[in-house]
Amino acid sequence: MNRKSYYILFIASPMLLVSIFATGTEEVETKPISVTGKIHWIFGYDQGQKLARETGKPMWVVFRCER
């Protein structure tokens, strides 16, 4: 390994450890938010999958991590 690789490893390792231990393990219930505009958001995966099958359109799935 060259010097640059050691530098990246030296910086990345503590950042990785902090990110692992800084995340909380508690579950928080996320409630749907009223969104105004032309887009009708569906927050339930099962509902979205049903609608995608009915309309023949693909699903756009967004995974959110909230504190």
Image (cartoon, grey):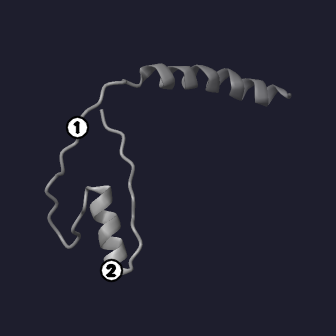
Q: Residue 23, percent across and down? A: 41, 25
Report, in whole angstroms, how far the alpha carbon at label 2 lies from the one at label 1.
29 Å
Q: Quadrant of the N terminus?
A: top right
Residue kind at label 2, given as amino acid type = Thr
Q: Residue furthest right?
A: 1
Q: Sort mark 2 into few (<14), some (14-19) or many (20+) by Cα contacts within 10 Å.
A: few
Q: Are marks 2 and 1 in contact (CB under 8 Å)?
A: no
60, 56: nearer the viewer: 56
Count of number-bearing discs: 2
Q: Is residue 38 left or right of residue 53?
A: left
54, 57: nearer the viewer: 54
Q: Residue 43, percent across and down? A: 25, 56
Residue drawn at 36 percent across, 24 percent down? 25
Residue drawn at 14 percent across, 64 percent down? 36
Q: Which mark is residue 51?
A: none
33, 52: nearer the viewer: 52
Q: Sort mark 1 into few (<14), some (14-19) or many (20+) by Cα contacts within 10 Å.
A: few
37 w.r.t. 46: above or below: below
Which of the two labelled residues, at mark 2 and mark 1, occupies the earlier sequence position? 1
21 w.r.t. 5: above or below: above
Q: Quadrant of the C terminus?
A: top left
Residue 30 quadrant:
top left
SS class of the residue under badge 2? helix
Q: Residue 59, percent across and down? A: 39, 67
Residue that mark 1 sits on: 29
Q: Residue 12, percent across and down? A: 63, 27
Residue drawn at 72 percent across, 25 percent down? 7
Residue drawn at 36 percent across, 40 percent down? 65
Q: Is residue 36 left or right of residue 6?
A: left
Residue that mark 2 sits on: 55
Residue kind at label 1, given as amino acid type = Glu
SS class of the residue under badge 1? loop
